[in-house]
Image: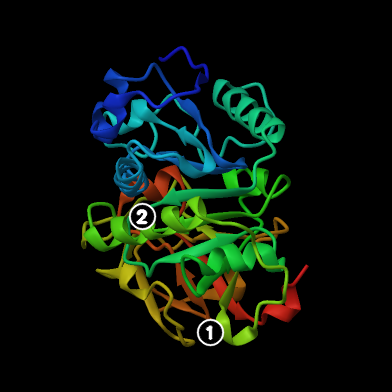
């Protein structure tokens, strides 16, 4: 088990510009916050590798920083490089760790103490905007997430995508913590290793590096496709499951992640239920159980009971156990949620 503490630097070690994510543990002692000066003093905060196997953000950040070699940055930048221990093993999180993107609320665990130190540092630095860069394990479009539907948050999200997801659970994520300090977004860049994801993240980083100001005017409804995350879908530990016709309590349809961001009608087939006691644990943002609202079992088939739209469906059994199967969303009007 690692002895976890926050490493703070006021310069960019030259080897970092070429070190891949899986080798960062050879250059850095642990999670690291790097402060770099720029023409505008209020810093952009960029976090990468909160999940060790989500490498697009780090590759994109290296690309942009290399473009600025020998030049002053247009704005100060603070970079948080997260779970390098998990990155060394190409894992989201290691078994003994708290998920680095579920650790941003005050607590006694080592990961929570590190994140609180990051928050204190950035509060003192008067952070200007925050961008947390992630990948998905399933097939998803690129999209941005916000935890407040204020116009500055939405304008920041628009720099990445017109597809924006608003959520308030889980409330232990980085963007939620930073939303109390500045406009903050999370961006989902598809699966790691895809060149378009890297280029899209690079474009966003260049944009926030050069931000002079964030507009205050209202975001037009036609400029944003806003989705509200209504519930999280998990599989109770006592039930087995599979995605590849392997015998288990719940056998999901193959390529179920192709349903992400797809409006599903009543009666859509999700899985075969071989254990009559098996069910999905579906919890809304107020902690209420919604399984019977969303799903029913007919002739051993799990089908959607009403119209719904999933996101972040994955076919990785490890990710399902570590996090969740998916989220359930609804398309909403900006004006109904604007703060």
Query: Is 114 rendered above or below residue 64?
Result: above
Give left or right: position of 314 versus 209. Answer: left
Residue placed under numbered mark 1 in the picture? 307
Image quarter hosting the N terminus: top left
* Residue 179, visible in the rendered structure: yes
Query: Is 84 rendered above or below residue 59?
Result: above
Q: Residue at x 67, y 82 (%)?
A: 333
Residue placed under numbered mark 2 in the picture? 202
Residues 126 and 213: in front is 213
* Residue 171, visible in the rendered structure: no
Local crowd at mark 2 within 10 Å, few (<14), some, or many (≥20)?
A: many
Q: Position of residue 214 (x, y in %)?
A: 64, 62
Could you tell me if the residues under marks 1 and 2 are in contact, i.e. CB atoms within 8 Å? no
Q: Residue at x 58, y 76 (%)?
A: 226
Quadrant housing residue 112:
top right
Q: Position of residue 159 (x, y in %)?
A: 50, 66
């Amino acid at each position: 088990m690692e002895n976890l503490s926050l490493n703070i630097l006021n310069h960019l070690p030259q080897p970092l510009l070429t070190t891949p994510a899986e080798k960062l543990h050879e250059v850095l002692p642990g999670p690291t916050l790097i402060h770099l000066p720029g023409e505008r003093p209020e810093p952009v905060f960029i976090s990468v590798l909160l999940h060790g196997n989500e490498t697009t953000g780090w590759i994109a950040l290296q690309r942009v920083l290399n473009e600025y070699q020998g030049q002053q940055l247009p704005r100060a930048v603070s970079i948080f490089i997260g779970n390098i221990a998990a990155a060394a093993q190409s894992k989201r999180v290691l078994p003994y760790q708290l998920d680095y993107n579920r650790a941003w609320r005050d607590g006694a665990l080592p990961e929570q103490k590190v994140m609180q130190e990051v928050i204190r540092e950035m509060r003192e630095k008067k952070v200007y905007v925050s961008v947390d860069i992630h990948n998905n394990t399933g097939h998803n479009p690129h999209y941005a997430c916000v935890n407040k539907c204020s116009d500055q948050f939405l304008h920041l999200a628009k720099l990445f995508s017109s597809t924006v997801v608003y959520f308030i659970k889980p409330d232990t994520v980085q963007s939620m913590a930073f939303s109390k300090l500045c406009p903050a977004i999370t961006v989902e860049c598809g699966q790691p290793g895809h060149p378009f994801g890297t280029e899209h993240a690079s474009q966003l980083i260049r944009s926030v590096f050069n931000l002079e100001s964030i507009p205050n005017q209202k975001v037009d409804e036609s400029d944003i496709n806003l989705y509200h995350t209504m519930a999280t879908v998990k599989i109770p530990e006592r039930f087995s499951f599979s995605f590849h016709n392997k015998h288990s309590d719940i056998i999901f349809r193959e390529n179920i992640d192709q349903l992400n961001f797809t409006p599903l009608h009543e009666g859509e087939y999700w899985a075969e239920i071989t254990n009559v006691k098996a069910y999905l644990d579906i919890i809304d943002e107020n902690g209420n159980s919604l399984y019977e609202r969303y799903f029913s079992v007919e002739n051993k088939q799990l089908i959607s009971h009403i119209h719904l739209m999933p996101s972040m469906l994955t076919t990785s059994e490890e990710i399902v156990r570590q996090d969740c199967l998916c989220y359930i969303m609804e398309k909403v009007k900006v004006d109904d949620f604007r703060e």
